[in-house]
Image (cartoon, grey):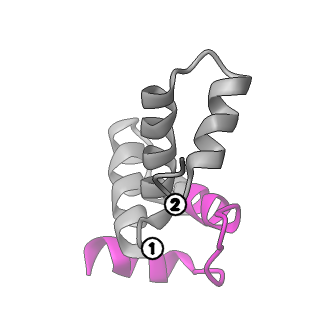
Amino acid sequence: MPTGPYDDLIAHLVRSTPLDAGEAARVVDEVLGYFSEQLPEFVRRRHAELKRRGLTNEQIFAALSAELATRRVAPPPLSARQLRRIVYG
């Protein structure tokens, strides 16, 4: 008996991976949360992560531009200046 909108996906993950139903549900929740992150929050989070890895802003903004282009629903291309404004205001 279905209890949620992603039961079919969870069942598929249980059949095709070693995950149990609870683990599969948590994976689906994580993926949905990741892809529902709004653009400014995503840019700030990734900037901070890449900065901690020692990348320069020039490298970070290039990486962010490339990553944004591959998002499930990609935003229009953003310049380094636009990305900088999101991060620093």
The rendered magenta stretch, by its main secondary structure, is classed as helix
The residue most toward the left is 89
- Place of residue 82 in the rendered image (x, y in percent of width and height, measured from the top left): 47, 83
The quadrant in which residue 54 appears is top left
Task: Reply yes or no: does residue 81 show up in magenta.
Answer: yes
Q: What mark, if any, has residue 35 been given in the picture? A: 2
- Place of residue 61 in the rendered image (x, y in percent of width and height, measured from the top left): 52, 63
- Place of residue 38 in the rendered image (x, y in percent of width and height, measured from the top left): 41, 72
As helix, strand or loop, the secondary structure at mark 1 comes to helix
Q: Is residue 49 left or right of residue 67?
A: left
**Residue labelled with disc 1:** 39
The residue most toward the front is 1
Q: Amino acid at mark 2?
A: Phe
Relative height, residue 33 to residue 30 (above, below): below
**Callout in the foreground (1, 2):** 2
As helix, strand or loop, the secondary structure at mark 2 comes to helix
From the viewer's side, name the closer residue of 7 and 86: 7
Q: Amino acid at mark 1?
A: Leu
User: Dot 1, how many residues are within 10 Å of its Cα: few (below 14), some (14-19), or many (20+)?
Assistant: some
From the viewer's side, name the closer residue of 50 and 12: 12
Relative height, residue 6 to residue 53 (above, below): below
Q: Are marks 1 and 2 in contact (CB under 8 Å)?
A: no
Relative height, residue 12 to residue 9 (above, below): above
Q: Quadrant of the C terminus?
A: bottom left
The residue positioned 65% from the left and 80% from the top of the image is 77
Q: Disc 1 versus disc 2: distance between alpha carbons?
A: 10 Å
Relative height, residue 73 to residue 17 (above, below): below
The residue most toward the top is 18
- Place of residue 71 in the rendered image (x, y in percent of width and height, measured from the top left): 64, 63
Q: Which residues are magenta?
A: 62-89
The residue positioned 32% from the left and 51% from the top of the image is 48
The quadrant in which residue 30 appears is top left
